Amino acid sequence: MTIYTQIDANKRKTRLIMALFIIFISLIGYIFGRIYGSGLSGFGVALIISGVMSFFSYYYSDKVVLLLSSAKQIHEKDNPHFFHTVENLCIGSGLPMPKIYIIEDTAPNAFATGRDPEHAVLVATTGLLQKLEKLELEGVVAHELSHIKNYDIRLMSIVVILVGVISLLADWFIRSFWWSGGRRRERRGRGGNIGFILLAVGIVLAILSPVIATLLKLAISRNREYLADASAALLTRYPDGLASALEKIATDKEPLEAANAGTAHLYIVNPLKSDIMHNLFSTHPPVGERIQRLRAM
């Protein structure tokens, strides 16, 4: 598979998953609305609450992440090699220069954040700058710049809103069901078999929908990682540089002390220890598969 076909395939998959997401949330809103006459208003309330929460996350999450990671901004004089690497790749990709931050940690890793290319931040650990070769570092920087260019932060903010809406709707439905008492269930019973079927489907969706929504979110996140890998390979014209960097980062034994469960999903390689359950609910695809795809380009 070529770089171009990988990029096209990843974009198609993202559109497909987003379409399924919209269909799924529409189905939930419709069924809950049929069961409870106020379902549509409940949907609106859920959308407003999730929207307000995501608004603050969208505009201020980068500052919170930088604070939690103890990252410090640097300028050209502080690390000319890293600064010029980012600058040259920005010129090649047509992106404005992001702010550059450094985390004082010997574990190699990096991430990007910011709501759009004009407000982007690129962060690397000192371990990454010390342990990677020039072409490997270019691959990592190109990957993070691809996240910025592809508006992945904005996309995932939208996905978070959708997941929040689904979770709030499910919680609202379950609470309404249990607090409504026998009168509402009796009224549904008079609706015949269709009423019972809708109620049963609504209960199942209320229980399973948050899990399904989370899995859809993870699928989108993993697909965007593949897209960033392919876009980085297109930018540097050297897929093996990123593949080698991923291999070094994944096999490095030093723990990244600045990372935690709330920020781990941002890094190019998840810095937390993996197990079976973690792999199932990971925002990143397996590193081995990413390396294999890059080396097959």
Image (spheres, helix red, strand yellow):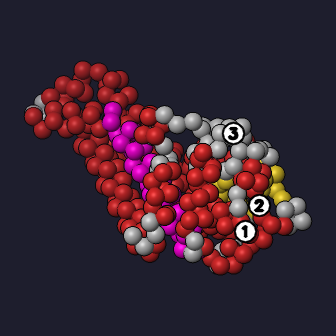
Above or below for 287 versus 89: above
Query: Is the residue under label 2 in contact with that under label 3 (CB below 8 Å)?
Result: no
Percent of width and height locating residue 116:
63, 65
Left-right relation of 284 to 15: right
Q: Amino acid at mark 1?
A: Val
Viewer-side label of 3, 2? 3
Above or below for 239 versus 289: below
Query: Is the residue under label 1 in contact with that under label 2 (CB below 8 Å)?
Result: yes
Q: In the image, which residues are magenta?
A: 207-235
Judge whether residue 79 can be spotted in this image. yes
Percent of width and height locating residue 222:
46, 53
Left-right relation of 101 to 269: right
Query: Sequence-wise, which precedes: disc 3 or disc 2?
Result: 2
User: Which residue sits at x=42%, y=40%?
Assistant: 280
Percent of width and height locating residue 153:
57, 58
Viewer-side label of 3, 1? 3
Above or below for 174 versus 146: above
Q: Which mark is residue 86?
A: 1
Q: Does the magenta run of residues contain 226?
A: yes
User: Which residue sits at x=63%, y=50%?
Assistant: 249
Viewer-side label of 2, 1? 1
Q: Which mark is residue 100?
A: 2
Q: Which mark is residue 254?
A: 3
Within 10 angstroms of label 1, few (less than 14), some, or many (20 or more) residues?
many
